Image (cartoon, rainbow, N blue to C red):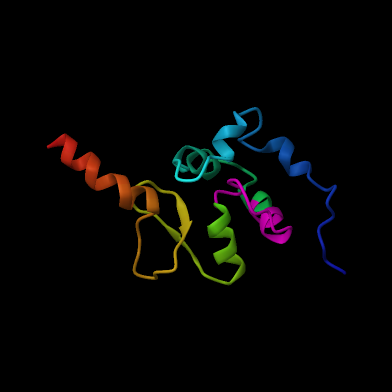
């Protein structure tokens, strides 16, 4: 049990960009948009510590370190993280050819159609 980060060592949370934000942003109901939370995470100075903590301790729900529960499960399996060129947010995708994050893949075509 060496090299395990202790549960009580969460000093990084004091510097988190999400501190004081509405908890509903981080724990959206199924099918709700996670883009707002991921945008805040992308600017957070402790995103790495948050993500590592959530992956290590098997946090199953919510957005932690910019990743959803499904993305954290994929990360634990060694699936690499990708950068979305459209919105600038990192995501974990099964498809190595997929550059856009799920939000941009789903909403971008609809937004473009409305603009035309």
Residue drawn at point x = 54 percent, y = 58 percent = 70
Q: Is residue 60 magenta?
A: yes
Judged from this view, the residue extending furthest toward the left is 116
Residue at (57%, 33%) from the top-left corner? 24
- 98 sits to left or right of 48: left
**Residue at the image position 53 percent from the left and 59 percent from the top:** 71
Q: Residue at x 78, y 42 (%)?
A: 11
Residue found at the very far right of the displayed protein: 1
* Magenta-drawn segment: 51-67
Q: Position of residue 50 (x, y in %)?
A: 67, 49
**Residue 18 drawn at (x, y percent):** 61, 35
Query: Is 109 rendered above or below residue 92?
Result: above
Location of residue 104 in the rendering, given as x and y in whole percent from the top left corner: 33, 49
Rendered-image quadrant of the N terminus: bottom right
Q: Quadrant of residue 97?
A: bottom left
Q: Nearer the viewer, residue 61 or 20?
A: 61
Give coordinates of residue 116: x percent, y percent: 12, 37
In the image as oriented, which residue stretches furthest toward the front? 30
Q: Is residue 114 above or below residue 90?
A: above
In the rendered image, the vertical position of residue 79 relative to residue 51, given as above or below: below
> Which residue is at the front of the view, 16 or 75?
75
Is residue 74 one of those drawn in magenta? Answer: no
- 66 relative to 54 in the view: left or right: left
């Amino acid at each position: 049990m060496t090299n395990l980060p202790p549960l009580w060592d969460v000093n990084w949370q004091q510097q988190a960009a999400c501190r004081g934000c509405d908890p509903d942003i981080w724990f959206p109901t199924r099918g709700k948009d996670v883009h707002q939370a991921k945008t805040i995470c992308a600017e957070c100075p402790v995103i790495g510590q948050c993500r590592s903590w959530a992956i290590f301790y098997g946090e199953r729900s919510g957005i932690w370190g910019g990743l959803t529960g499904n993305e954290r499960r994929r990360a634990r399996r060694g699936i690499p993280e990708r950068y979305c060129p459209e919105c600038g947010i990192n995501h974990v995708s099964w498809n190595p050819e997929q550059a856009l994050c799920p939000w941009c893949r789903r909403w971008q075509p609809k937004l473009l159609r409305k603009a035309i």
